[in-house]
Amino acid sequence: MNREDKKEVDLSVVIPVYSEELVIDELYNRLSRVASKIASNYELIFVNDGSKDNSLASLIRLARNDNKVYFINFSRNFGHQIAVTAGLDLCCGKTIVIIDGDLQDPPELIEEMFAKYKEGFEVVYARRTERNGESWFKKITAKLFYRILRKSTNIEIPIDTGDFRLIDKRVADYLKLMPEQNKFLRGQIAWLGFRQTHVLFTREKRKFGKSGYSVTQMLRFAMDGITGFSDKPLSLVTRSGFFISFLSFIIILYAIYSHYFLNRTITGWTSLIISSMFVGGIQLISIGIIGEYISRINKNVINRPLYIIESTNIKSSIQVLK
């Protein structure tokens, strides 16, 4: 079924999908049960982010059998945050839920989130108490990242949370006014403010397959979060420059003192090589940090579309280029 207009519904659920063929049917059944309890007028928007399996075929089948199901199929893999952004751009709900398509986030928690929303909160995010089925490396790095991010930024970004959350339509409307190419939605939502609260849950391990996030992608995501909401790395570069200059000045004074007053000239290639490598390392790190900020500026100046929609059953989305 094609949606011809932008008629508002009570609840929209945005689900980014990347090679989740084996869980799509169960995900659909559980989401439908929960959404129907909350609102009779709802929509499920699946965003196929360049899946390498038959996820798209499964989504098309669901859309044909249920007029509350919509799909957006990207021309290639644009990334999780962009997939969520596309769903937010095209959904019509007064209330919007963002949930991953791997069933690690339990759809049944949406009822509890909606109850908090009815209390007057515009944002209700799900906070993880445990992360089952994940390696110790990912648990440690995730915990470290959230705490570094909190220390680095001036806004209160909730720790131990992903993108699983319920937001009011007003929040989604303001997100559409944020044109940056390097999306970090949980940071953007925190920056917006409004009344926010959380519900607790235990994140389940994946039933099938493995995470599509590689270590490189996680590092990229972390860098987007830090550089998008803090200028402290640039401040660190400046302070490092002053510290190295001061240290070098002290060494120069010591060398002069040793030569003229102690009759002992500092010699040896070891100290020279070590100091050169140390200063060189600091310079490369500093250039890299500055380069990250320049890269963000460059991407936003180029202003390419965030995503390309290859096919969808939302007709109004054909003209949408963000």
Image: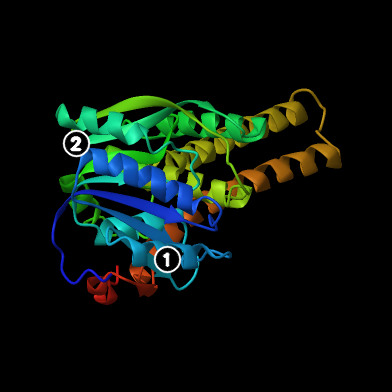
Mark 1 / mark 2, whichever is N-terminal: 1
Quadrant where the C terminus sits is: bottom left
Residue 131 - label: none
Task: Count every numbered label the image shows and give the total.
Answer: 2
Task: Name the element at disc 1.
Answer: helix
Left or right of 129? Residue 268 is right
Residue toward you, 6 or 69 = 69
Label 2: how many Cα within 10 Å (few below 14, some 14–19, many 20+):
many
Q: Position of residue 136 (x, y in %)?
A: 65, 30
Residue 122 - label: 2
Examine the rendered structure and indicate whether residue 194 appears above or below residue 276. Answer: above
Residue toward you, 149 or 79 = 79
State which mark lies toward you, 1 or 2: 1
Residue toward you, 287 or 88 = 88
Task: Name the element at disc 2.
Answer: loop
Quarter of the image where one finds residue 112: top left
* Residue at 39% over, 52% down: 15
Examine the rendered structure and indicate whether residue 207 appears above or below residue 292. Answer: above
* Residue at 69% over, 41% down: 278
Q: Position of residue 134 (x, y in %)?
A: 61, 34
Residue 61 - label: 1
| Label 1, label 2: how far apart the Cα atoms are | 34 Å
